[in-house]
Amino acid sequence: MMRFLAAGADLWTSTDEPAIAPRLLLRPEQWQDVAAAWPQELEVGLLLDNTVDVQRCELPLHRFASIALRFPKWTDGRAYTQARLLRHRLRWQGELRAVGDVVVDMALQLWRTGFDVAQLRAGQDPQVARRALAFFEQLPPAPFYQGDAREPRPLFLRRQAA
C-alpha cells in the first residue's frame, strides 16, 4: 500500500551542505562528494530532479535505500516516466518517493508508475489521498489497457493467460 505524508512529516530530509547523517536525501553531485566516506551500514537516499535521465545515471543505484523524484509542478509528469523506467527497465526495488508539488489528484498515477511514498505539498490531506487510492484499488483487477509498475502485462496478455 502506498503511503502519503503531510508536508513536513517526512523522516527523510535533504540539505544544501552534504554531511554524513541517517535518512539524508542527496543530489547526485552531493553523493559524489561524500560517497567514499559514507558508511555502508548508514542508509542514504538520492534526490533527483525530473530532468535527470535515470537510464544514463552513472550512480550505484543499489547503494540507495530510497530515491526521491521531484515534481516541480503537479502538471509536470516527467517524474512519472523516471519512476516507470526505474521500476520496469532498471528493475530498481528500493523505496521510491514523490516529492515537490505533489497533490491528492496524482494518487492513482503515482501508484501505477511505482511510487511507494508521496510527500504531499502543504494543504493536501494524506487521509483524502488514501481514500482516493482505495477507491481505485476496489475496482476489478487491472482495468487498464497498458501495463504499469504493479501489473506490467498489457491487457491482451492478461486475457490470454486467463
Image (cartoon, grey):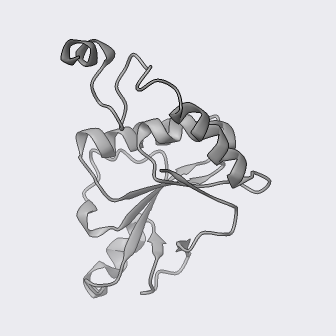
Vertical placement of residue 99 versus 145, above or below: below
Vertical placement of residue 58 versus 112, above or below: below
Q: In this view, does 82 lie to the left or right of 92?
A: right
Which of the 4 quarters of the picture holds residue 74? top right
Q: Is residue 146 left or right of residue 70?
A: left
Residue shown at the point (43%, 20%) measured from the top left: 144
Which of the 4 quarters of the picture holds residue 39? bottom left
Residue shown at the point (55%, 76%) measured from the top left: 15
Near-viewer residue (129 or 26): 129
Vertical placement of residue 78 versus 13, above or below: above
Vertical placement of residue 87 versus 11, above or below: above
Report if residue 103 is visible in the image. no
Q: Residue furthest left?
A: 161
Find residue 134 and report its horizontal and vertical position in percent. 58, 40
Find residue 14 and report its horizontal and vertical position in percent. 54, 72
Which of the 4 quarters of the picture holds residue 107? top right
Near-viewer residue (99 or 51): 99
Residue shown at the point (27%, 19%) measured from the top left: 158
Residue shown at the point (24%, 46%) measured from the top left: 90
Near-viewer residue (139 or 30): 139
Find residue 41 and report its horizontal and vertical position in percent. 28, 84
